[in-house]
Structures are given as structure tokens and as C-alpha cells.
Amino acid sequence: MNILITSAVSAQAHRLKSRLVADNVILGDYQDLPDFMLTTGKMIKLPNPKSIAYTHEMLTLCLDRAIDVIYVLDKIEAVLLIESKQLFAEYNIEIQKGNEI
């Protein structure tokens, strides 16, 4: 199972990651991340939620990386992704609010 956790630079994201039992957990953020954090592949740059195509950019990213579950910690991202929950479900991608775990 591949899991994506948003808000990679937050302590909440790292706490959540440590509690999950999964093969592959990736942290992602749309905020600027230092290059050294991105080179390992365990952190990725996410699309900016201010983009008109944000939902489709996130869906493409999830399909490219075979993401099964997204734990959304950022409020702006949560609003947009929860609105598109049905679209993601059609591709077997589950969206969870990170604070509901």
C-alpha cells in the first residue's frame, strides 16, 4: 500500500507517519522544500492548491505514484480533495483527513 501524507514539513505529518503501518509512506508539501529533502524520494513536491487544475494535478500525481490513500493535513487541500472524493474513489484512491486518525 502506498500512502501520501500532505503538509510534509509539519510535526503532525511526521507523527502520523510513525503511527502508520504501511510499505511505502511518502510525505508531500506544496510549500517550498529544500532539495536535500526531495532527493531521497520520501518527500515530494505537491501541486499548489491555488492552481485551477489542483484536483487533476493531484489525481495525476497519485496515479503516477500508485498512491492508495491520501492523508490530508492542510485545511485548504482538505476542502478541495474532499469535494473531489468521488473522483478519486473511481481510481481506488481513498482520501482521509489526517486529524481523524
Image (tube, grey):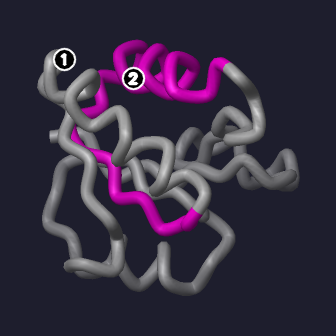
| Residue 91 point in image, percent of width and height | 18, 17
Q: 6 or 26, which lies in front? A: 6
Q: To which quarter of the image does residue 90 belong?
A: top left
Magenta span has 37? Answer: no
Of labels 2 and 1, earlier in sequence is 2
Q: 36 or 86, which lies in front? A: 86
| Residue 45 point in image, percent of width and height | 69, 39
Q: On the rendered image, what quadrant is the C terminus found in? A: bottom left
Q: On the rendered image, what quadrant is the N terminus found in? A: top left
Amino acid type indicated by mark 2: Arg
Q: Residue furthest front?
A: 83
Q: Helix, strand, or loop for circle 2? A: loop
| Residue 59 point in image, percent of width and height | 42, 21
Is 30 on the left or on the right of 26, as rendered?
Answer: right
Which residue is tagged 1?
A: 91
Q: Which stretch did the figure color magenta?
A: 53-75
Distance, label 2 to label 1, CA atoms, is: 13 Å
Mark 2 burial class by Cα count in 10 Å: few <14, some 14-19, many 20+: few
Point out which mark residue 65 bears.
Answer: 2
Look at the picture and state if 8 lies above or below 32.
below
| Residue 86 point in image, percent of width and height | 20, 29
Q: Helix, strand, or loop for circle 1? A: loop
Count the numbered circles shown. Answer: 2
Is 46 on the left or on the right of 70, as rendered?
Answer: right
